[in-house]
Structures are given as C-alpha cells and as structure tokens.
Amino acid sequence: MASGSGVTATTLSVDKCPSRYEANDINPPELHRTIALQELSETDVRRVESLRLLREWIATHPHIRRCRTDALFLLRFLRARAYDVQAAQTTLVRYLTMRQLFRIWYENLDPSDRYMRELVENVRGCLPLGLDRSGRMVALVKVRCYDVARFNCYHLGRLQHMLFEAFFDDVELQIAGGVAIIDCDGATMGHFVCFKLSDIRNFMDCLVHALPVRVKEVHIVRLPRIGQALGNLVLSFAAEELRKRIFFHASMDEVLKYVDQDLLPVEYGGKSCPEEITDSLKRRLADKRDTLLLLDRMEIEVEPYAHLWRQSDEGDVEFGMEID
C-alpha cells in the first residue's frame, strides 16, 4: 500500500492566506521521481514555482474563502494537470464547488460513521491493494459485496470519496496515478439501478474535471448482460481520454495482462490477505480522520460556478440530506 503523507490535521490550515505555508511536500521514491519527470515534466524548480503561483492565486481569489494551501494538497491538482497551473486552478475551483453542491457525497467523510465503518470493516467491497511494478495504486471493487437493500447509492458514493481523500496526499498516487479493477461477478439488477441517471452523469463529470486523480486504467470484469446498458451509459458520459482507459473483460485472467497478480487477494490467485488490507485501511482512516473532517471547513462562493453541473427538479443535488 502507498505510504501515508505523515501530515496531521493539527499541522494543516484552511486559511487561504496564512502567515507561513506548510513545506510538507515529500521527496518521492526514485521510481516516482522518474515518472514525475517523464510524464509530468516535474522538477524541483518547477514544483516550487508552481506552488508559489497557485498560492498567490488562491490568496487573491475573490470567491475562494477558505482552502488548504499546504504543498501536498496543492500538488494533487498540479500533478493531476501535469503542472498546467491554469488547468490546476480550474480543477481546484471545481473541486471546492463540487464539495458544496454535492454535500451528501462529500461532507462529513467520517470513518467512525457507523455505515462507513461497516462498509470498511465488514463488507470489504473496496480494497486498496498497493502499488504495482509501475508504481501505480491498484484498488479492487467487488460489487457483489454490497447489499443494496441496506446501503444506498449515497453510502457507496461517500465510501468511495472517503477512500479517495484518504489517499490523495500520497505522492505515489499523485505521480503515478491509480488503477481500478471492478469485479461485477454476482452483481444483480439492484446494483445497477441504485444510481440515478443524474448521479452517474455528475459523478463522471466530477471524476474528469474536479477530482485531482490520474486515472490510468479502469478494468470492468464479468459485467453481466443486465449491466451492459449501464456500462454503455457510463462510457457515453466519460470524456474521450477516459474512455480510452476503460476496459471490459470476460474474466480476471484477461486483467492479469495489465495488473500484477501477486497484488490480488488470495481468492483471485494472488498473495494479498483481505484481513490485513482491511486492518491497514482502518489504521490509515483513523490517522486521517481529522484531516478528512478538516476538508468541510474549506469554502467557496458557489453561485458563480453552480452552472457547471446540471441540476433537476427532482433533488439531484441535495443539501444536508440524511441517509441513515
């Protein structure tokens, strides 16, 4: 599993113009320094200068009220946009707006919440497997594990985003990106109808334009016929660049052409122990809890940017909706 940042909420601030900036950018491992240079054109000089420009822009932005400005947070956006500072600015604005528009997905991502705790400890439907030989973070999603009679789309969406945020500060993920394996074996109609059309559309838009993550590959395995229509719908909402990175497979054997088998859980012929993965994830989430909750203190004036996402009269964008 990728290393944690070692940054705690007590060292962080959402003051957009602090008297002193946190110099907590971690020196990447050699493999990731090479990837950063080759794929992102990242150098020490460019990193420092880009951080300076982004911080100055945040400090004077008329609509950003509160925002983390520590290096690890801002490097999420710079690395996701290959150091195109203007593109990183646009992504940051969308990220801050997204968090407030879709509060039911993004606010109070608390690992101690009873649903989040149950999903992590007992359901084990999403397992971060660690880094592959290419330095990428690999995660496995087992759709069949989720009881859709107990967990609705918002529980699942919140879990996904809590895990995203728990790993976003890892320099390995920021630089080399992530690979998702979505195992649909045993999925039912209930799994494919729990998300509304607007949920799918807005999530795909957030993934492409607002979430600071480098999606390298998405492998969808054993998608049943009842889910093919949803798969086509997801593809229709995905940007062209993302569509090229989404692959459909009839079996896990096909996935092994892309992913190191040893990373997979033992039930897939690998060497990973789900219990150990879960224990490690629980420790990470406990360590990250204050940092996750600190995100709710960031704030942007939403009105100038609300038009970026479609909203219907059916309450597609909820504010403070209770899900338990």
Image (cartoon, rainbow, N blue to C red):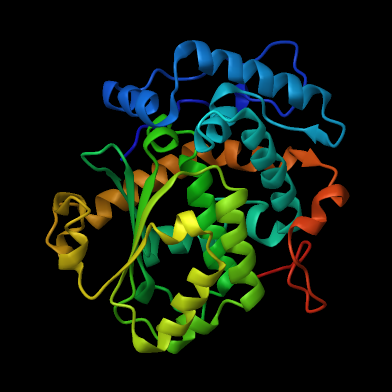
Q: Quadrant of residue 275?
A: bottom left
Left or right? Give the position of 98 relative to 201.
right
Total numbered labels placed on residues in the image: 0
Residue at the image position 40 percent from the left and 38 percent from the top = 173
Residue 132 placement (x, y as % from top left): 24, 43
Q: Quadrant of residue 39?
A: top left
Classify 4 as above or below 106: above
Residue 140 placement (x, y as % from top left): 32, 59
In front of the other: 219 or 6? 219
Residue at the image position 66 percent from the left and 25 percent from the top = 69
Left or right? Give the position of 46 relative to 255.
right
Classify 105 as above or below 84: below
Residue at the image position 51 percent from the left and 26 percent from the top = 7
In front of the other: 313 or 126? 313
In front of the other: 83 or 251? 83
Residue at the image position 82 percent from the left and 77 percent from the top = 313
Residue 282 placement (x, y as % from top left): 41, 47
Classify 218 as above or below 249: above
- Residue 112 visible in the displayed image: no
Left or right? Give the position of 117 relative to 9.
left
Name the quarter where the C terminus is drawn: bottom right
Residue 1 placement (x, y as % from top left): 30, 40
